[in-house]
Image: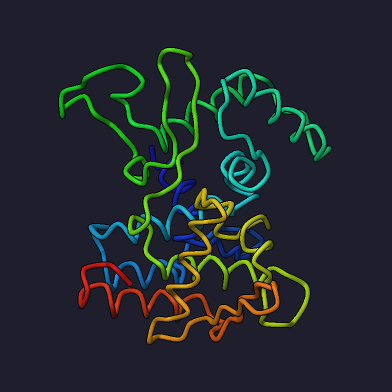
Amino acid sequence: MVSAIRYWLQATGLTSVKTETADGKRTSRFEQTEFARLLMDHDPFIEDEGSLWFIHYELATNLNQSTTWSWFFNRFGVRHFTQDMFLAHLQRFVDAQGKRKIAPNSLEKDFRCFVRTYSRSADRVGHLSPEENFDCPLSSLNLLEYLPRTKSYRTLTPDEGGLPELLVAYALVRMRARMPLMSNEISFRDALYAEGGPGRVFNLDPEILFSYLVRRDENENKVLSFSRTAGLNLVTLNISDHLKVMELYYSTVGRDSGSV
């Protein structure tokens, strides 16, 4: 269990590992990240749903430590799928990386863990008593649904208002930091389809993402501007530090009950 906790803390960006050498021995030291510090300062018990969205974003974009999660949200691109389809696509992706051979049963374990992260137990196995319910907190984001008739899954788009607007801005700032160009502008297409963008990671369709960007542009906190002239939809980011977006979220969530 200690190993599992250590893994998930790293996969969700809450800890980082520092390797040190003393007396000829290498040791690893785990440190709290700035991301974790902000969560602990503002929402130590993860009671605000926005905190779950922040954690989901970090998990779904950590290709090195949560490969299956990152692959699913950023590369799979299939809205309705079965276990066999999921595993076939994942196997091809893993093989294409060419690093090392992954056994099929390891991928199956990843699949089971992944669907338990986002789908509710009651959907998969029927009604459960509270004592038997071990749902991951991220299942409350309602991003994945199990369809018992066909024994398949489908991704869900968050209801407008269910995903805080500043989380869309957070994703754009994080995505922009990974892009090679220095411009602070992002095309609407990239916001919708690029890896690490809000369209991919939050399962947003074009209409809902457009609506989010329009509302964010009209907000008094000018985190971003959205230009819709001459048929060219461009997002201009006015903040380059994603931690400042987090700070802004927590400073406003108490004031207007999370609709920020």
Q: Quadrant of the N terminus?
A: top left
User: Percent from the top left, x then y, of residue 162?
Assistant: 33, 55
Q: Residue at x 15, y 23 (%)?
A: 129
Estimate the x, y position of residue 205 in percent, counting from the top left. Answer: 54, 51
The residue closer to the viewer here, 102 or 3, is 102
Query: In front: 206, or 171?
Result: 206
Which residue is at the front of the view, 182 or 80?
A: 80
Q: Quadrant of residue 25?
A: bottom right
252 above or below 122? below
Q: Nearer the viewer, residue 34 or 69?
A: 69
Q: From the viewer's perspective, is 131 left or right of 2?
A: left
Q: Residue 114, how many percent across, how many down? A: 49, 34
**Would residue 127 be seen by someone viewing this image from the given angle?**
yes
- Residue 15 spot, x, y in % from top left: 47, 61
- Can I make out residue 11 in this image? no
Residue 260, by quadrant, is bottom left
